[in-house]
Every structure is written in structure tokens, then in C-alpha cells.
Amino acid sequence: QVQLVESGGGLAQPGGSLRLSCATSANIFSVKNMGWYRQDPGKVRELVASIARGGTTNYADSVKGRFTISIDYANNMMYLQMNSLKPEDTAVYYCNGQFGAFGPLYWGQGIQVTVSS
């Protein structure tokens, strides 16, 4: 059973930065794709950013130019660097990952990000 554990959330001021980390127990070299999603209470979970094996990335329009997704193969980690944060970025953020050609999609437990002055 693959485990994904998020860290790095918390409170940030508008215009500030946070870096979310996602540690995985999977062999990161077998990654097919990984991503970050977020969810507000009462709303649908939405894609924030994804990264595929080989490095192809995809971002939601609302975060393009502000957020950067990356994989650290040396440390079995995925990151989401969030800059120029806005109050509307407030949500619970989840990391997910698929490993191997036909592996299931795994999710982390989620971490709160709050952007407020």
C-alpha cells in the first residue's frame, strides 16, 4: 500500500509564499504521474497542478505563473511552490500519485492552506 503524506501547509498572508511537500513510500522512479488538488468545503475537488513522468506539467488557469510543481527523485518527494498567494487559494490541498503502468491512484490525507491577513 503506497502512502502519501503532505506537509508544509498553514497560514500565509496575501502575496506570501508556501511550499507544500508530499512524501511517498512508493519508488518515485516508477511514477506515472503525480498531482496536487484542492477542495473548499461544499465544493468539488479541483486540479491545481500535475506532473507526468518525463516532466510534463499542467496547471489550473488560476495558478499559472504563481505555482510550480516538481518532483525530487533523490528524496522521494513532490513539491508545490506557491507564490503570490491569494485568499481564494485557501483550501485543503491533497497530493496524489500513480505508480507503475497500471497502478491505482493514491491520495494523501490533505493539508490546510489558509491565506488571510
Image: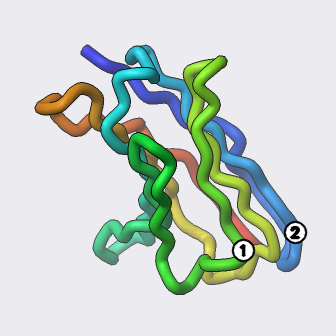
**Residue at left 87%, top 68%?**
16
Across and down, in percent, residue 6 comes to 55, 36
Residue corresponding to mark 2: 16
Determine which of the numbered discs, if any, sits on residue 66 in the image: 1
Q: Which element carries disc 1, helix, strand or loop? A: loop
**Label 1 is placed on what type of residue?**
Arg
Q: In the picture provided, is 7 more to the left or to the right than 85? A: left
- Residue in front for this viewpoint, 50 or 90: 50
Is residue 117 placed above or below 2 in the rendered structure? Answer: below
Q: Which element carries disc 2, helix, strand or loop? A: loop
Note whether residue 36 is visible.
no
**Label 2 is placed on what type of residue?**
Gly
Determine which of the numbered discs, if any, sits on residue 103 in the image: none
The N terminus sits in image quarter: top left
- Residue in front for this viewpoint, 74 or 24: 74
The C terminus sits in image quarter: bottom right
Is residue 1 placed above or below 34 in the rendered structure? Answer: above
Q: Earlier in the sequence, mark 1 or mark 2?
A: 2
Across and down, in percent, residue 29 comes to 43, 21
C-alpha gap between disc 1 and disc 2: 11 Å
Across and down, in percent, residue 105 comes to 22, 38
- State how many labels appear: 2
**Residue at left 35%, top 38%?**
97
